Amino acid sequence: MGMYPDPPKPMKPFAPLYLAGALTLFLATHSPAEDAPKGALEKITAALPDKPYAKPQKERKILVFSKTNGFHHASIATGKVALEEMGKKTGAFQVVISDDLANFETDALKNFDAICFLSTTGNAFSPKKDELATMSEEDKKTAAERDARLKTNVMSFVKSGHGFIGIHAATDSFYEWAEYGKMINGYFAGHPWGSSVPVSIKVEPGQEKHPLVAMLNGENLEFPEEIYQFKEPYDSKAVHMLLRLDTTKTDMTRPGIKRTDGDFGISWARHWEKGRVFYSSLGHNNEIYWNPKVLGHFLAGIQWALGDYDVEVKDGK
Ligand SMILES: [Zn+2]
């Protein structure tokens, strides 16, 4: 009290700087759980396995990317919570949730063991149409160069022995990137079964004991969910098929069914040179992310993609 001089008054920051600081703070503290439906975090935590299927060989980090340049799924927020909590509860991995394209530069990718495209849509490495319309020719050129560079980086990342995880609309993405289509094994060609249509999903016959689906005990998954039909370069023999639509227990009179071969794969795994790819088209509905069987299947697939789970995956080709 009077013994010390008054401390200097803090400088009043300029408003823009102040706002930028507040925004950074918001981004740093904003949890995806705040965007997910009420109670999602609790349901997800309760439904998740307690422990990993395999002991992580080292600390694992997954980049979860969910930028959209097309339809934006509301369930992305729920998927983020599920992946984050899966890592926390099982100790299998950590996630970095970010749509910052800088993460796909070569040096930044070195921080990750796998990348996950969670319901990305369109060319998520490119500015949106309305953004492009206002950009200078020079900026457009820079963006196009970055787009090409990031695609090369992702392919090198996977092929050199890392993991790639695709969830739901990851196949409704990057139509202009042929090698991506091959790696993920096909592109979205409509969803004859909409999100409220009850469907029955079976374990690929003969795979009942395969560790990536063994938690289903050979039983069908039955719930309403949006189910994709795939087009080229989809080839169910080029991957290790894990789950597919049970056409004997699902309404096959739905409008929009184009395939006549009954080949509606849902989850699969494959190698991609030295890398490992796990894809599941499940994940439209929020409820998918707190279904214990689906979460177990996702965890096993993710751990395999990370390289921690010694499981046989036969690509067929
Ligand atoms: Zn969807």
Image (tube, grey):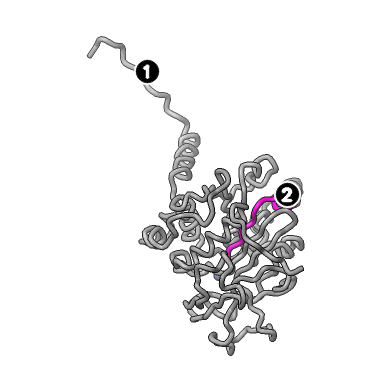
Task: State whether residue 137 appears in this view.
Answer: no
Front position in the image: 65 or 131: 65
Give whichever of 248, 168 is nearer the camera. 248
State the image coordinates of residue 246 (x, y, percent, origin top left): 57, 82
Residue situated in front as seen by the camera: 75 or 14: 75
Question: Tag 1's secondary structure?
Answer: loop
Can I make out residue 58 in this image? Answer: yes
- The residue to which callout 2 is attached is 160
Residue occupying the point 72% across, 61% down: 180
Q: Residue 204: horizontal and vertical position, in percent? A: 61, 75
The secondary element bearing badge 2 is classed as loop
Q: Which residues make up the magenta segment?
A: 151-168
Q: Is residue 209 left or right of residue 154?
A: left
Q: Can you name the residue that lies furthest to the left here? A: 1
Position of residue 254 relative to residue 115, above or below, is below
- Image position of 133 (left or right of 9): right
Ligand 1: quadrant of the figure = bottom right
Magenta residue check for 154: yes
Sort mark 1 into few (<14), some (14-19) or many (20+) by Cα contacts within 10 Å: few
Find disc 1 in the rendering and name its residue: 8
Q: In this picture, is 278 found above or below 217?
A: above
Q: Is residue 224 left or right of residue 261?
A: left
Contact between marks 1 and 2 (CB within 8 A): the answer is no
Q: How many marks?
A: 2
**Quarter of the figure that contains the C terminus:** bottom right
Q: Residue at x 40, y 58 (%)?
A: 45
